[in-house]
Image (cartoon, rainbow, N blue to C red):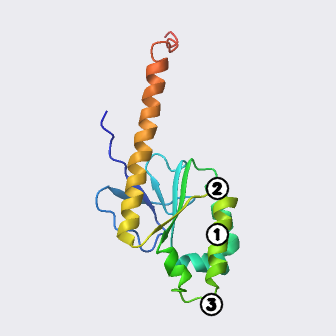
């Protein structure tokens, strides 16, 4: 079975969208997160942060960011995607006075508290490729599961009601 190509939904509030090259995109308002897959907006969620955005979210916008991560717990697939590296944080390559150890500790605590995998990609291009991969494999797995259900229950499905 050939997997259809997913369409990446980019939140309308995303000011600098990632440069997707291999998958179609659409702009739409997402209730949670910055990126999703069309048709799976309540199941697939990626929150993207640059290192600067992350530090801002962990310091001055911590309550709002915590609420966002809490909402993400409802998604089957959820990721916090940081555009930058752990080395960028450790080397204090951001403008805030926040201590790098505190930033890393907060990210780790949120990862555990919200059961949220955190991924680092060094460039926006690498981040876009990673989201494309996740979207393709997410859709593929959903289609495999649906096919298995149809095969298992297709022959035993109840007859449609008369008339």
Residue 56, given in percent of the width and then of the height, sits at: 60, 80
SS label for mark 1: helix
Q: Residues within 10 Å of mark 2 (few under 14, many from 20)?
A: some
The residue at the point 48 percent across, 19 percent down is: 152
Q: Are marks 1 and 3 in contact (CB under 8 Å)?
A: no
Whole-number angstrom distance, CA of label 2 to CA of label 3: 28 Å
Whether residue 147 appears in this view of the structure is yes
Tell which circle, 2 or 3, labels the residue nearer the N-terminal end: 3
Residue 108 - label: none
The answer to whether one can see residue 52 in this image is no
Q: Which residue is mark 3?
A: 97
Instruction: Give left or right: position of 67 versus 121.
Output: right
Report which residue position mark 1 lands on.
65
Tell me, for residue 115, which label it has, or none: 2
- State which quadrant residue 110 falls in: bottom right
Spot occupied by residue 116 in the image (x, y as percentages of width and height): 60, 58
Residue, x 36% and y 61% (percent of image)? Answer: 129
Disc 1: CA contacts within 10 A as few (<14), some (14-19) or many (>=20): some
The structure residue drawn at horizontal position 42% and vertical position 74%, both measured from the top left corner, is 16
Give left or right: position of 9 versus 45: left
Task: Tell us which disc is closer to us: 1 or 3.
Answer: 3
Q: Quick one: SS at disc 3?
A: loop
- In this rendering, the answer to whether 151 lies above or below 61 is above
């Amino acid at each position: 079975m050939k997997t259809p190509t997913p369409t990446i939904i980019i939140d309308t509030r995303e000011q600098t969208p990632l440069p997707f090259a291999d998958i179609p995109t659409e702009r739409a308002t997402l209730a949670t997160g910055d990126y999703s897959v069309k048709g799976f907006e309540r199941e697939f969620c990626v929150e993207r942060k640059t290192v600067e955005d992350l530090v801002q979210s962990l310091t001055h916008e911590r309550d709002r960011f915590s609420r966002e991560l809490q909402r993400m717990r409802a998604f089957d697939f959820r990721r916090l995607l940081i555009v930058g590296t752990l080395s960028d944080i450790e080397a204090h390559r951001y403008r805030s006075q926040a201590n790098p150890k505190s930033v890393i500790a907060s990210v780790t605590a949120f990862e555990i508290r919200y059961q949220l995998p955190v991924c680092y990609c060094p460039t926006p291009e690498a981040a876009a490729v990673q989201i494309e991969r996740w979207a393709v494999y997410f859709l593929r797995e959903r289609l495999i599961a649906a096919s298995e259900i149809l095969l298992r229950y297709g022959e035993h499905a109840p007859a449609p009601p008369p008339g």
